[in-house]
Amino acid sequence: MRLLEGFEGYLQSDGYAGYDVLCKKQNIVRLGYWDHARRKFTDEKKRRTQTKNKNSTSKVAKFFIALRKTGKLYAVERDITSLTPACTLPIPA
């Protein structure tokens, strides 16, 4: 609570529930990130490639789809890192 005392704006963090009350109290907008979710998909990819499944089908596994989509998000982030904001976004009530 002391760390963010008086802060208003956007807070990017993991899903730690300890921020919930603080964010509501101080008009802070929570932003998530994909690292933890993406790690589950990469772990599944490693697991699948290490075990040879005789019953595998030709369908594309869901973890490949998820990794492809998060890869596209990361590509957008790489492309915009040098940009500056054209305007300040309002904080939702």
Image (cartoon, grey):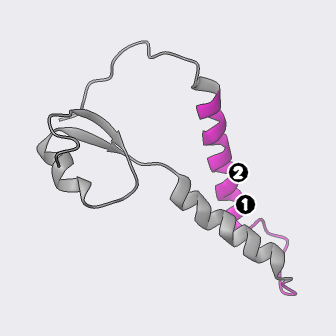
Q: Which residue is mark 1?
A: 64
The magenta segment is 53-78
User: What label sits on residue 68 in the rendered view?
Assistant: 2
Tell me if 34 is positioned left or right of 9 in this view.
Answer: right
Q: CA distance from mark 2 to mark 1?
A: 6 Å
User: What label sits on residue 93 in the rendered view?
Assistant: none
Based on the displayed image, in which of its 4 quarters is residue 91 positioned? Answer: top left
Tell me if 14 is positioned left or right of 47 in this view.
Answer: left
Give the dominant element type of the magenta stretch: helix, strand or loop.
helix
Q: Quadrant of the C terminus?
A: top left
Q: Is residue 32 above or below residue 45?
A: above
- Mark 2 falls on what kind of element? helix
Q: Is residue 58 magenta?
A: yes
Q: Is residue 64 magenta?
A: yes
User: Does the residue at mark 2 contact the one at mark 1 (Cβ under 8 Å)?
Assistant: yes
Dot 1 alpha-carbon crowd within 10 angstroms: few under 14, some 14 to 19, many 20 or more: some
Residue at screen point 31% across, 45% down: 30
Residue at screen point 82% across, 77% down: 50
Residue at screen point 54% across, 54% down: 35
Kind of residue at badge 1:
Phe
Dot 2 alpha-carbon crowd within 10 angstroms: few under 14, some 14 to 19, many 20 or more: few
Q: Is residue 60 above or below residue 14?
A: below
Position in image of residue 43 (x %, y %): 67, 69
Query: Which residue occupies the foreground of this view, 40 or 18?
Result: 18
Based on the displayed image, in which of its 4 quarters is residue 14 positioned? Answer: bottom left
| Residue reaching furthest to the bottom | 54
